[in-house]
Every structure is written in structure tokens, then in C-alpha cells.
Image (spheres, rainbow, N blue to C red):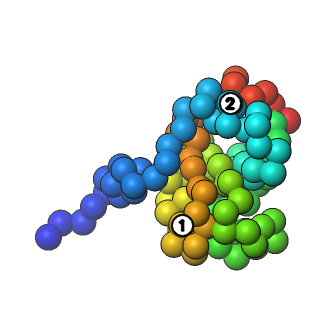
Amino acid sequence: MSLKTLQEIVAETKQSLHCLTPQAASEALEGNSDALVIDVREPGEVADKRPRGTINIPRGVLEMKITDYTMDPDQPIYLHCATGGRAALAAASLEHMGFNSVSIIDCSCDDLITQIGAA
């Protein structure tokens, strides 16, 4: 058995997730003021550019910090990162924790900023 690459793991993980385009995410957010949009990039990346309305919780501490923002398993959570890979792994982890309404915004950070604006 050979080892899987990160790209293979991310691709497999995305198959079981709810993935949104930036446009679909923008439309979903318009009618849902209680949704959380979480940027799972590192703080240094977020300092360079940040989509409007996002909360920064780095991927490495997401499981430890998410309950600071919600304990509601049905609260809509939208995750994004630089390219979609970390967001996919983060979404799978949140679903494993018991969150039921987790989606990834599957695009580059620049594409998301183009759609929803910068902070």
C-alpha cells in the first residue's frame, strides 16, 4: 500500500462535503445572519488579506476554538482558506465533532474577496 498525497486526501474528503462556489456562498450568506464564516488560514496570511465578515480560527486550533463561537450543532458554518484544501480537512473535522451544517467555500481567497469584499 502506498501513501496518499495531500491532494488525494483533500480530493477524497471534498467528495463527502457540501462545497460552494463564492457566488453560491454569497447568496447563502445574504439570507442567514447567524452563519459563521471561518477563515482557517494562519494569522499571518489573514493579515495580508481578509474577506469581509470572516472569523480567523487557524486550522491547527479549530477543534479547540470552535466552541468559543458556537455550541449549536445546526448553526451554519462556512469554511474557507487559500485554496480549499485546509477548509476541506477542517470541515470534515467539524462534521466529526457533530456539526451538521458545515460547508466549504471552494475557491481561492482572492476569488472570495472579489465576491464578498475585503475586510
Looking at this view, is 75 or 114 the one in front? Answer: 75
Residue identified by numbered label 1: 95
Tally of numbered tags: 2
- Three-letter amino acid code at the position of disc 2: Glu
| Mark earlier in primary sequence (1, 2) | 2
Q: Which x, y percent locates residue 104?
A: 56, 47
Q: Residues within 10 Å of mark 2 (few under 14, many from 20)?
A: few
**Marks 1, 2: nearer the viewer:** 2
Residue that appears at 69% across and 31% down: 26
Q: Secondary structure at mark 1?
A: helix
Eyeballing the image, is 82 above or below 30?
Answer: below
Q: Please indicate whether residue 47 sits to the left or right of residue 28 in the image.
A: right
- Under mark 1, the amino acid is Glu
Which of the labelled discs sits on residue 31, or is there none?
A: none
Q: Residue at x 67, y 63 (%)?
A: 74
Q: Is residue 10 visible?
A: no
Q: Circle 2 — which element?
A: helix
Residue in the image at 39% along x and 55% along y: 16
Spatial CA distance of label 1 from label 2 is: 23 Å
Residue at x-position 75% and y-position 50%:
35
Q: Are marks 1 and 2 in contact (CB under 8 Å)?
A: no
Q: Position of residue 78 (x, y in %)?
A: 65, 49
Quadrant assignment for the C terminus: top right
Residue 71 lies, in percent from the top left, at 75, 72
Q: Quadrant of the N terminus?
A: bottom left
Instruction: Give the class, few, some or many, for how many residues have Cα within 10 Å of label 1's Cα (few <14, many ≥20).
Output: some
Q: Which mark is residue 27?
A: 2
Residue 105: x and y in percent read 58, 41
